[in-house]
């Protein structure tokens, strides 16, 4: 290479480096536009993270613009990152099916997809909340898809209600028999009846409802499906089968009548923690937290984890929980992942990621307008 070429080469290289370093994020700025490697706002709402080969994979609802924005017109998107700040668009992991006879047809509702890796089968398994096309939220199904490669394509298996004809571990036959079925909240004393299993009994034969959901894989590789059931009034936690493709009959009711949505679970020092929300649709509400020594119960409420202004505490910093990320290589470092929904233009929905702090053995969240992973070294 002659001197002139060398100089041109050097200048081009330097500009590339400058361009790259300028674009590169080195911190989180919750609630702001978050651009991917193509300079597009990340499109992975109601998401979850799978850590695989020291890389984070972020799966989420791929929203579209316009009136159909909250429906699944495309599918489930996936992004990858090694530092949690900079994300590469890896495409659509699970595509909606262009066939009106398929349950997964375009225009159905796919929400809160979560992916886990099964070491025994060497497969990636996705579960998601699934509603059938043009049926609102009445189907209340959970769906499953599977892939050989982490970014897909995921092959759709099925969507279904859960545990038809099966009683949970913490609800006796006697309690079941005593429960009085009600259809809705117009019933007098509905709340008390719901706690005692009114909606549970209503759906006993057809299977239990499943709406907002998440997955959790324990240290021993046992996986769990956690979902808002019984008309969103009661959470159900189910142990998954060894291949993660179905649920076992082992499940429990958690916080009957507690009205929890948006569950997200993490484990610290042998204890299980849960963030969740109340029920106000796309609008935010006060967050909730809970702890258990055993994921299969007893869960104990720890109250609103948010510490801030009245408005921040009443709205979870204007967000709703979706997942908690354990940071690779940092002990006890967890990130709360929430959605700031914008239903009128769903694609613009923002992400509220905050460090999980612990005070008096309780997980708490405080607002940070900008922060980075060094936060965990200093706290
Ligand atoms: C929320 C739920 C979202 C979505 C929305 C629809 O309560 O957490 O995932 O289902 O309702 O209104």
Image: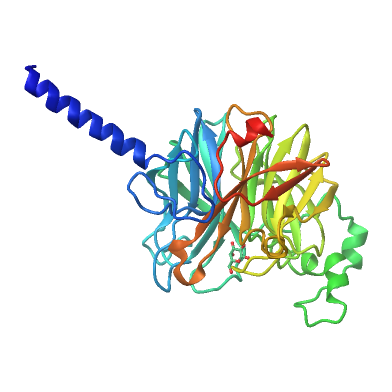
- Answer whether residue 102 is visible to the viewer in this image: no
Quarter of the figure that contains the C terminus? top right
Q: Which residue is drawn at 6% across and 17% down?
A: 2
Quarter of the figure that contains the N terminus? top left
Q: How far from the left and from the top, in percent, is residue 279? A: 69, 67
Q: Quadrant of ligand 1?
A: bottom right
User: Does residue 123 sit above or below 130 in this rendering?
Assistant: above
Classify residue 97 as left or right of residue 130: left
Classify residue 312 as left or right of residue 253: left
User: Does residue 17 sit above or below 42 in this rendering?
Assistant: above
Q: Looking at the image, how many numbered discs can be counted on the residues?
A: 0
- Answer whether residue 69 is visible to the viewer in this image: yes
Classify residue 280 as left or right of residue 270: left
Give the quadrant of residue 150: top left
How is colour applied across the structure in the image? rainbow
Q: Residue at x 62, y 29 (%)?
A: 330
Q: For this rendering, which residue is in front, 152 or 277? A: 277
Q: How far from the left and from the top, in percent, is residue 167? A: 81, 55
Q: How far from the left and from the top, in percent, is residue 56? A: 50, 37
Q: Which residue is drawn at 82% across and 51% down?
A: 302
Q: For this rendering, which residue is in front, 306 or 260? A: 306
Q: How far from the left and from the top, in percent, is residue 196? A: 87, 65
Q: For this rendering, which residue is in front, 97 or 21? A: 21
Q: Residue at x 24, y 30 (%)?
A: 14
Classify residue 337 as left or right of residue 41: right
């Amino acid at each position: 290479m002659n001197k002139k070429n060398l100089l041109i080469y050097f200048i081009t290289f330097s500009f590339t480096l400058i361009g790259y370093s300028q674009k590169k994020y080195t911190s989180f700025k919750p609630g702001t536009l978050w651009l991917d490697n193509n300079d597009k706002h990340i499109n992975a709402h109601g998401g979850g993270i799978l850590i695989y080969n020291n890389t984070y994979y972020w799966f989420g609802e791929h929203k579209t613009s316009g009136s159909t924005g909250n429906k699944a017109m495309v599918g489930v998107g996936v992004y990858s990152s090694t530092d949690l700040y900079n994300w590469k668009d890896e495409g659509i992991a699970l595509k909606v099916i262009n066939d009106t006879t398929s349950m997964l047809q375009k225009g159905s509702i796919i929400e809160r997809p979560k992916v886990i890796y099964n070491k025994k089968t060497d497969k990636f398994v996705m579960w998601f909340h699934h509603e059938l096309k043009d049926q609102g939220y009445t189907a209340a199904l959970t769906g499953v898809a599977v892939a050989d490669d982490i970014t897909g394509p995921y092959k759709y298996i099925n969507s279904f209600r859960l545990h038809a004809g099966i009683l949970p571990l913490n609800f006796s036959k006697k309690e079941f028999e005593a429960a009085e079925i009600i259809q809705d909240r117009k019933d007098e004393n509905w709340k008390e009846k719901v706690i005692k299993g009114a909606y549970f009994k209503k759906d006993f034969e057809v299977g239990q409802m499943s709406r907002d959901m998440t997955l959790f894989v324990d240290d021993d590789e046992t996986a769990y499906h956690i979902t808002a059931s019984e008309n969103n009034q009661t959470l159900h936690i189910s142990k998954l089968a060894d291949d993660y493709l179905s649920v076992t009959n082992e499940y429990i009711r958690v916080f009957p009548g507690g009205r929890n949505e948006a569950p997200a679970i993490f484990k610290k020092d042998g204890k299980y923690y849960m963030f969740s929300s109340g029920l106000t649709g796309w609008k935010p509400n006060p967050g909730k937290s809970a702890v258990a020594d055993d994921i299969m119960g007893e869960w104990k409420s720890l109250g609103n984890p948010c510490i801030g202004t009245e408005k921040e505490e009443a709205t979870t910093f204007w967000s709703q929980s979706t997942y908690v990320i354990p940071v690779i290589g940092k002990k006890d470092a967890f990130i709360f992942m929430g959605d700031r929904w914008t239903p009128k233009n769903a694609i613009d929905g923002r992400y509220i990621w905050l460090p999980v702090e612990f005070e008096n053995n309780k997980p708490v969240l405080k607002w940070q307008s900008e922060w980075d992973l060094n936060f965990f070294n200093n706290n």
